Image: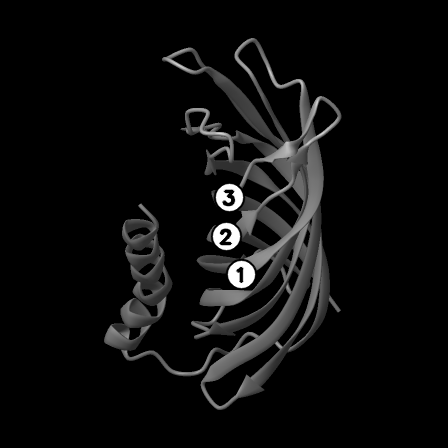
Amino acid sequence: MKRHTLLLATAALVTPLSFANAADVDISSYDWSGPYLGIQGGFAFGDASHSFSNGAPSDNSDPEGFLGGVHAGFNGQLGDILVGLEVDAELTGINGSFNNTTGGTSSGSTDINSQGSLRARIGLPMDRLLPYITGGLAAADVDYGGGPSGGPCCGFSKTALGYTLGAGIEYAITDSITTRVEYRYTDFGSESGGLSPTFPTVSMPTDLETHAVRFGLSFQF
């Protein structure tokens, strides 16, 4: 699953710049350099794989939901290439759960409360159009729930750390306002904790990854 996802993410990363190189375009007349601030929103879905140290059946809670927040960054020009650094922070309603009643029973849930990232961006300006790739560090505040069938009774909270990779296209509507659409894959790795308060000695390792499509609006200074 993860290998297939990474292949898709890699293809999404290389497509915009390969497309631009094939067009053999020159450096844009529009000035993309400088600082900017913006807002963003979108939808995410993911895969959260739960397992249990006591042998209860494993399953996936598959969280999904909307997200929204702010971003800020700085762009600089290196010849025909635009390079930049961007940070974002979002509140999310990304959550999911499962209830497994086969044999020994289990239940689980994943709730992503907030998330953010620190990323590099590399783009190839084509006048007012900017295809780009992006990647860097990601973090999220996540509540994990687990227990017997009937709904999670217990759980733990973690600050999940991982990486994010993506690609997007940005367009300058005016000389100071741009809009964008972006896809990102994020792998938050594996977290584990005891199912307190009822089953504190039972640990529940959980692997979490998400896919998100975001739409954004930025103000260039």
Is 66 rendered above or below residue 81? above
Residue 220 coordinates in the image, percent (x, y): 70, 65
Of label 3 and label 1, which has the lower sequence position?
Answer: 1
Give how far apart the Cα atoms at labels 3 and 2 are. 9 Å
Of label 1 and label 2, which has the lower sequence position?
Answer: 1
What kind of residue is marked 2?
Answer: Thr
> Toward which corner of the image does residue 101 lie, by quadrant?
top left
Give how far apart the Cα atoms at labels 3 and 1 are. 11 Å
Residue 72 coordinates in the image, percent (x, y): 72, 62
Residue indicated by mark 1: 163
What kind of residue is marked 3?
Answer: Leu
Point out which mark residue 208 bears.
3
* Observer-nearest of 203 and 35: 203
- Residue at 47% x, 73% y is 123
Quadrant of the image for the C terminus?
bottom right
Pointer 1 with pointer 2, Cβ within 8 A: yes
- Residue at 54% x, 45% y is 214
- Residue at 65% x, 54% y is 139
Residue indicated by mark 2: 186
The 10 Å Cα crowd at callout 2, few under 14, some 14 to 19, many 20 or more, is many
Hey, which residue is sitting farthest bottom in the picture?
Answer: 79
